[in-house]
Amino acid sequence: MTATITQPNLVPLRSGMYEMPDSIDGTPRLYGQRCTSCGEIFTTTHREYCAYCGKQTMESRRLGTIGIVQTFTIVHQELKGSLMETPYVIARVQLTDDRVQIQTVLCDVEPNDVTIGMQVEICLKQVDEDEDKQIVVSFFFRPATRS
């Protein structure tokens, strides 16, 4: 008799922000919007009008997975109820393919090793476990393993 290995259910910390992969090792894809009139891209998903040209011609799109650290700060003080352990890095990352910026937490890197210009990629990490023993995940960015 062969044992079956099952993947635990993954639950997003905040739904609607990204496309969930099949496993925690998969690549999530952030959702954004693009104006079909002028081509401007936004990281928000509920925009009615383009902030650049003012037209009501927004379409949903998946954003890129690779970016460059534009600026960052190291957080040393833990907020009450936070799922993050200090110290950690909050970074402003410009997505390479889309030329938009997103604020995110960096993982898999020591805070003092982060540099402006560092190439990073999106990933999923477990942040909690719910009462049904499902794995609660959120997206992060980590140093890129591919170019």
Image (cartoon, rainbow, N blue to C red):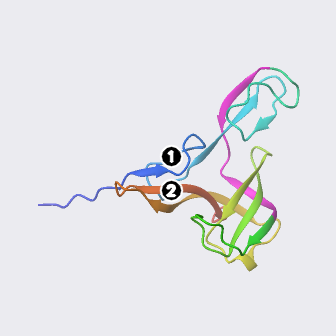
Q: Are marks 1 and 2 in contact (CB under 8 Å)?
A: yes
- Which is more foreground, mark 1 or mark 2? 2
Neighbor class of circle 1 (other Cα within 10 Å; few <14, some 14-19, many 20+) is: many
Of 57 and 78, nearer the camera is 78
Residue drawn where x is 58% and y is 64% of the image: 81
Neighbor class of circle 2 (other Cα within 10 Å; few <14, some 14-19, many 20+) is: many
Q: Amino acid at mark 1?
A: Met
Q: Amino acid at mark 2?
A: Val
Residue 46 seen by the camera = yes
25 left or right of 134 in image = right
SS for tag 2? strand
Numbered mark located on residue 20 in the image: 1
The spot of residue 5 in percent (x, y) is 27, 59
Image quarter of the N terminus: bottom left
Of 64 and 111, nearer the camera is 111
The spot of residue 22 in percent (x, y) is 44, 49
Separation of disc 1 and disc 2 at Cα? 9 Å
- Predominant secondary structure, magenta span: strand
Q: Earlier in the sequence, mark 1 or mark 2?
A: 1
Residues in magenta, as a range: 56-71
Residue drawn where x is 74% and y is 46% of the image: 97
| Quadrant of the rendered image containing residue 120 | bottom right
Q: Which residue is mark 2?
A: 137
